[in-house]
Image: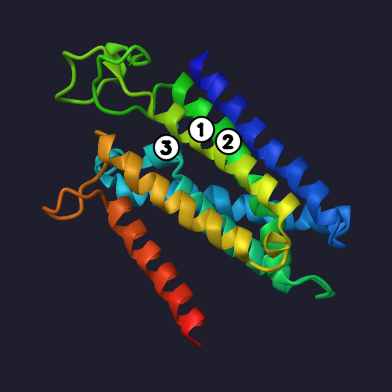
Amino acid sequence: MQLQWYGVLMALAVLAVYLISEKRVRRIGISADQFSRLAMTTLLFGFVGARLWHVATDWQLYQEQVLAILYIWRGGMSIFGGLLGGALGLWWAYCRLPSKHVKFLQLSDSIVLALPIGQAIGRLGNWVNQELYGLPTNLPWGIYISPDHRLPGFEQFSYYHPLFAYEAIALLFFTAVLWFQQKNSKSWNVGTGKVTYIYILFYAVLRITLDFIRPDKQLFSSTGLGVNQAILIGLVVFLLCQKMTKRAA
């Protein structure tokens, strides 16, 4: 039943993003038919990207059973790969629109407002299959992880940080702030790229922070940082440098 709920919640996450995004892109002149094609390409690229990123960063799980790469119902979909693949798919589909009356940043800003909601719903899928949790904890809100889902070296612990919940709550709070800012400040209007930039920066910092209490992260060399953390720190530095360069110009 857990695996079935995982699939249901992933489907609900995609549906939520689709419905909210469709409503928003209609305001900037994208027809329902155009958005349908954009969404299908974005979803396909995002799905493949999510799986490939997970396999690449957790290769030790598949090197002795390569066919397990295809067992997506067991979980193992990286949000980073999904976002990167989805962004590439969206750009690829956008470039093939017959008319460019809408700027790409208008499109990305419109869709980004829906992404955190879908991510928060998707994190519930990680909860039902006990796929994402933090280090052991005695805090009152610690979640019970069944013995067969505990990582090697943590078998003696029963309760762990609800990492999925931390991320979901942060994403929903961020969504509320985004919607409020866009409604009350013209500088946050769709098409400026500010919404897309802030979303990328926020989520990168959020994951860098939360991964410090993630026991299953793949370490980057002997630094103690996870592979994803190292990549995201590089992304944050790049974005901040880009912003400073533009201001200086």
Q: Residue furthest left?
A: 222
Point out residue 220 in the picture as x, y percentages from the top left corner: 20, 54
The one nearer the camera, 125 or 138, is 138
Instruction: Tell me, yes or no, whether the two marked residues, 2 and 1, touch with CB atoms within 8 Å.
Output: yes
Mark 1 vs mark 3, CA separation in Å: 18 Å
206 over 197 or under it: above or below: above
Residue at the spot of label 2: 172
Q: Residue at x 47, y 84 (%)?
A: 248
Res 127 quadrant in image: top left
Q: What amino acid type should be assigned to the residue bearing mark 3? A: Gly
Q: Secondary structure at mark 1?
A: helix
Q: Residue at x 23, y 25 (%)?
A: 151
Q: Residue at x 71, y 57 (%)?
A: 185
Residue at the spot of label 1: 168
Q: What amino acid type should be assigned to the residue bearing mark 1? A: Ala
Residue at the spot of label 3: 76
Mark 3 vs mark 2, CA separation in Å: 23 Å
The one nearer the camera, 19 or 86, is 19
Mark 2 vs mark 1, CA separation in Å: 6 Å
Q: Nearer the viewer, mark 1 or mark 3?
A: 1
Q: Residue at x 63, y 48 (%)?
A: 178
52 over 102 or under it: above or below: above
216 over 109 or under it: above or below: above
Left or right: where 79 falls relative to 215: right
Q: Residue furthest front?
A: 184
The tag earlier along the polypeptide, 3 or 2, is 3
Point out residue 191 in the picture as x, y percentages from the top left corner: 72, 67
Q: Is residue 117 visible?
A: yes
Q: What amino acid type should be assigned to the residue bearing mark 2? A: Leu
Q: Nearer the viewer, mark 3 or mark 2?
A: 2
Applied colour scheme? rainbow
Dot 1: within a 10 Å radius of its alpha carbon, few (fewer than 14), some, or many (20 or more) residues?
many
